């Protein structure tokens, strides 16, 4: 490019020099050298102005720059511009092809993808969106998405711009189809809504739940029979079998407890909501203390700390069972002489928490994220020795989820653990005595 330009420059310069030299020679012959050189300069200047005007016209025109066959600087400028224009057109074509391929790929996705602007207006969507959300092309482009998908849960979630996915939303076209939605922010003010059909997954999950519930239910009767017969056998009548009988009774009690816990979990999983009752925390904490005392048999100091500015709203039965699980664990995993504190207190954000703190063996940090999984145990032997099923914390987690609450676990090995049930302000009530006070 630069070489061609240099050649054209030299050719133009030579031509100009030849023109001026010719004019000078003729001027000498005519005895008017200055006038001839001036006339030649004016001629050269006029020629360049004309070429400049032509170049400007061609550049502004709708057509591509035509090829020039001269060898001067203007011809080279024209040809260089033509080459640039050609490269730009090729680039544009490549970009359009790339964009088209990208759109085709996005359109072919089995998941619905909707590009939204800052106000949640629809900028673009793929073919699956028509199938899953019922959007229509092209009339829904530019529409406000919450006006088209009219589910309060969805509208609220979109307004919050939730980081966590919205699970199990029925499709607006077919209640039977269940959707999971994710909102992915990109650029500064745009977001991408990705919607996946999880009906199949939900069905499998339902089959799994039904299976566990059915197996547990089927095991219940035979276990009751075995348990009953074992209870009828007196060890004194067959002293040689006494240790065996003792072990059989232990194991059948453990199996019964596992089956009961699995049934409790299945029952909780099948529910979407629970009764909304006022739970007065003082009597509840007193009942928990009595349970802890009975289990500990005086081996632990049990302390209750109560801030009774709040009552709790939820299911008395389920919450009692969840709290009781935490208290039982605290006693079971704390050596004799330890201290267990049950604390009900308000949080800075307007919520409140029930915390069970022990001075027990503690839990190494790597186990904490998995503690609420079914049958997950840090030490299997200790859990079994003390009659654990490995399902207690799963039950706690489910009960709390049904109350939009969460389980916060802090623990330090050798120092102790705190299991706290953290409730939002919408779950709190003013105690009746306070509410009624003038
Ligand atoms: P388990 O019936 O085995 O106690 P859980 O689901 O109640 O089952 O608890 C799961 C595991 O978490 C237990 O096996 C134990 O290892 C650990 N864990 C629970 N609570 C405590 C606690 N207060 N201190 C130490 N470890 C605990």
Image (spheres, rainbow, N blue to C red):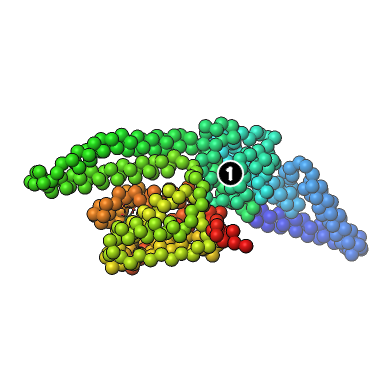
Q: Which quadrant: the C terminus? A: bottom right
Name the one closer to the observer, 183 or 169.
169
Horizontal side of residue 29 vs 130, given as left or right: right
Numbered-mark total: 1
Whole-percent x and y of residue 246? 16, 48
Residue at the farthest left position: 240
Horizontal side of residue 165 vs 55, given as left or right: left
Q: How would you rate the neighbour count of disc 1 (Cα within 10 Å): few for under 14, some for 14-19, many for 20 or more?
A: few
Residue occupying the point 23% across, 54% down: 385
Whole-percent x and y of residue 202? 45, 37
Residue occupying the point 36% across, 37% down: 213
Q: Label 1: state its secondary structure.
A: helix
- Asked if ligand 1 lies within 8 A of label 1, the reply is no
Q: Is residue 264 positioned above or below 424 on the image?
A: above
Residue occupying the point 38% across, 35% down: 210
Horizontal side of residue 31 vs 85, given as left or right: right
**Which corner quadrant of the figure contains ligand 1?**
bottom left
Residue topped by disc 1: 153
Residue occupying the point 26% across, 38% down: 224
Name the one closer to the observer, 256 or 389.
256
Whole-percent x and y of residue 422? 47, 57
Residue 29 in sight: no
Whole-percent x and y of residue 258? 30, 45
Residue 337 in sight: yes
Horizontal side of residue 197 vs 62, given as left or right: left
Q: Which quarter of the picture shows residue 215?
A: top left
């Amino acid at each position: 490019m630069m070489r061609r330009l240099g050649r054209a420059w030299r050719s133009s310069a030579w031509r100009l020099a030849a023109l001026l030299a010719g004019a000078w020679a003729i001027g000498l012959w005519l005895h008017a050298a200055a006038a001839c050189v001036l006339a030649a300069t004016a001629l050269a200047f006029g020629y360049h102005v004309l070429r400049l005007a032509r170049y400007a016209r061609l550049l502004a025109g709708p057509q591509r720059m035509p090829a020039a066959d001269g060898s001067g600087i203007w011809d080279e400028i024209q040809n260089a511009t033509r080459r640039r224009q050609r490269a730009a057109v090729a680039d544009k074509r490549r970009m359009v092809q790339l964009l088209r391929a990208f759109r085709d790929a996005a359109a072919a996705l089995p998941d619905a993808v909707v590009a939204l602007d800052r106000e949640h207006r629809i900028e673009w969507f793929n073919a699956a969106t028509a199938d899953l959300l019922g959007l229509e092309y092209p009339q829904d482009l530019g529409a406000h998405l919450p006006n088209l998908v009219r589910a309060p849960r969805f509208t609220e979630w979109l307004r919050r711009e939730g980081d966590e996915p919205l699970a199990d939303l029925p499709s607006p076209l077919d209640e039977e189809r269940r959707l999971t939605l994710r909102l992915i922010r990109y650029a500064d003010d745009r977001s991408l809504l990705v919607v996946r059909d999880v009906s199949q997954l939900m069905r499998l999950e339902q089959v799994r739940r039904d299976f566990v519930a059915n197996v547990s239910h089927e095991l219940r009767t035979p276990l009751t029979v075995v348990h009953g017969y074992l209870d009828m056998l007196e060890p004194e009548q067959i002293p040689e079998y006494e240790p065996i009988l003792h072990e059989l009774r232990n194991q059948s009690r453990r199996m019964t407890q596992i089956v009961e816990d699995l049934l409790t979990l299945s029952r909780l999983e099948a529910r979407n909501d629970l009764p909304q009752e006022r739970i007065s925390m003082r009597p509840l904490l007193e009942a928990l203390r009595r349970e802890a005392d009975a289990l500990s048999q005086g081996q632990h100091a049990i302390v209750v700390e109560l801030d009774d500015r709040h009552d709790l709203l939820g299911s008395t039965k389920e919450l009692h069972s969840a709290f009781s699980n935490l208290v039982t664990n605290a006693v079971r995993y704390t050596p004799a002489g330890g201290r267990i504190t049950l604390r009900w207190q308000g949080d800075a954000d307007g919520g409140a928490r029930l915390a069970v703190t022990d001075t027990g063996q503690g839990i190494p940090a790597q186990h904490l994220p998995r503690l609420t999984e079914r049958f997950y145990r840090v030490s299997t032997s200790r859990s079994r020795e003390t009659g654990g099923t490995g399902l207690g914390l799963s039950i706690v987690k489910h009960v709390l989820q049904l109350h939009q609450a969460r389980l916060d676990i802090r623990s330090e090995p050798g120092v102790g653990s705190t299991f706290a049930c953290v409730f939002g302000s919408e779950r709190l009530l003013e105690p009746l005595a306070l509410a009624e006070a003038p």
